[in-house]
Amino acid sequence: MSSAAPGARATSSRFLRLSAGLVGDAVLLASTALAVAAVGRTEGGFEVVFHGEYREIVTNERLVYTEVYEGAPEGEAVDTMTFTEQRGRTSLTILMQFTRQEHRDAVIDSGMEAGMQDAMDLLEQVAVSLS
């Protein structure tokens, strides 16, 4: 695994791209701070804020990043998104790992499944539009 080149930076357009002179497909983001944050509002008006940092990017294979819900910052998760291609179709598997079972249970009980399903439906629409 190679580390990010000095001066690596993220640019945003429709998709996030890492632009740097990198060797190999794996990027360990130890020398580059690449963070993400999201703010949303539920139908009831409740604000939901998340933030995290990318820990690993393996082109066309895997993303590893932290996910912190600011309403419960002690429950940080490490998420791994794995992309697997078979017969021209890509499957996405997301694994959320917590250090404590009660943090995992709180996420399960939060109802976030509906929000994740909405996000996956939107991602599918983008993927279909590109094919």
Image (cartoon, grey):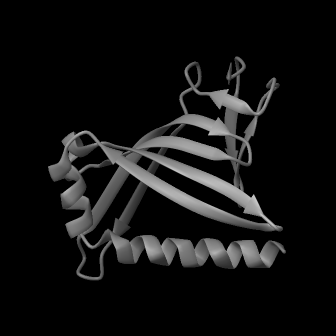
- Whether 39 is drawn above or below 34: the answer is below
Position of residue 50 measured from the top left corner of the image (x, y, whole percent)? 36, 52
Q: Is residue 54 above or below residue 124?
A: above
- Residue that protrudes farthest toward the bottom in the picture: 43
Residue occupying image coordinates x 23% and y 71%: 46
- Determine the residue located farthest toward the left in the rendered image: 102
- 119 above or below 69? below
Looking at the image, how many numbered discs can be counted on the residues?
A: 0
Residue 58 at x, y percent in the picture: 68, 39
Q: Identify the image quadrant of the C terminus.
A: bottom right
Question: Between residues 41 and 60, which one lies in front from this camera angle?
Answer: 60
| Image coordinates for residue 57, horizontal then vertical, percent | 63, 38
Residue at the (32%, 69%) spot, across then down? 112
Most distant residue in the front direction: 87
Can you say whether 104 is above or below 10 in the image? below
For the N terminus, the quadrant is: top right
